[in-house]
Image: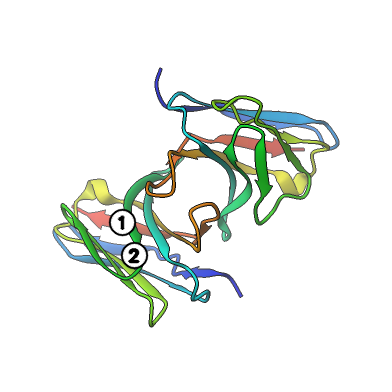
Amino acid sequence: QKEVEQDPGPLSVPEGAIVSLNCTYSNSAFQYFMWYRQYSRKGPELLMYTYSSGNKEDGRFTAQVDKSSKYISLFIRDSQPSDSATYLCAMSEDFNKFYFGSGTKLNVKP
Amino acid sequence: DAGITQSPRYKITETGRQVTLMCHQTWSHSYMFWYRQDLGHGLRLIYYSAAADITDKGEVPDGYVVSRSKTENFPLTLESATRSQTSVYFCASSRDGNYGYTFGSGTRLTVV
């Protein structure tokens, strides 16, 4: 069983839609959580970094962590075609060894 | 230029050859990491380093060697390349545990 599970998609939505991206995990000791965006043939870029449970908001992006369910989410409001990319979740017990999901490919149609 | 740079961007090598991938960062970040990215597996940690002369294994270290004699450099060496090491390799750095990682642009390695 993988440490982190993520639906590969692709997820296709119209411009302006609210997007929900999710990951589940098996290790209850995970307490650091990250979301990355990766454009084709580029390195991942950090979107959100959260510690423990709760919500964090940054502009159009909201990250949620539910440790009791071992489930994390990234919401994108007012999605734009420029948001079309692969989104990777990552999590860790400490900040040295992050386990990444395999990524969800998002396509936002104009 | 400031940031994290990887070289080469593309590399083709033959089975059995030794190859070294370079990673250089200009921020003096303490932590550096090497990941490989394969379809269906996402990013998997190969090795990481918490400071100069301190390195540790990640999920998939077999067949790889790292060193970190200077804070800014973290080379990854494939001692005897195999086809299963064909992948995209990403280097990343982090100031400390309160910040996320910054990734380089990657090295696309093909072993033939």
A22 vs B96, nearest the viewer: B96
A36 vs B16, nearest the viewer: A36
A109 vs B111, nearest the viewer: B111
Q: Quadrant of residue B2?
A: top left
Q: Which residue is mark 1?
A: A107
Relative to A14, is A53 above or below?
below
Residue B11 relative to residue A75: left or right:
right
How packed is label 1: few (under 14 Cα within 10 Å), some, or many (20 or more)?
many
B41 vs B93, nearest the viewer: B93
Q: Amino acid at mark 1?
A: Asn
Q: Which residue is mark 2?
A: A11
Relative to B95, is B4 above or below?
above
Residue A68 relative to residue A63: left or right:
right
Relative to A110, is A29 above or below?
below
Determine which of the numbered discs, if any, sits on residue B40 in the image: none
Residue occupying the point 41% across, 17% down: B1
Residue occupying the point 40% across, 61% down: A33
Q: Secondary structure at mark 2?
A: strand
Residue occupying the point 32% across, 71% down: A53
Relative to B92, is A33 above or below?
below
Label 1 resides on the chain identified as: A
CB-based contact (under 8 Å), mark 1 and mark 2 = yes
Q: Position of residue A49 (x, y in %)?
A: 34, 54
Location of the C terminus of chain B by quadrant is top right
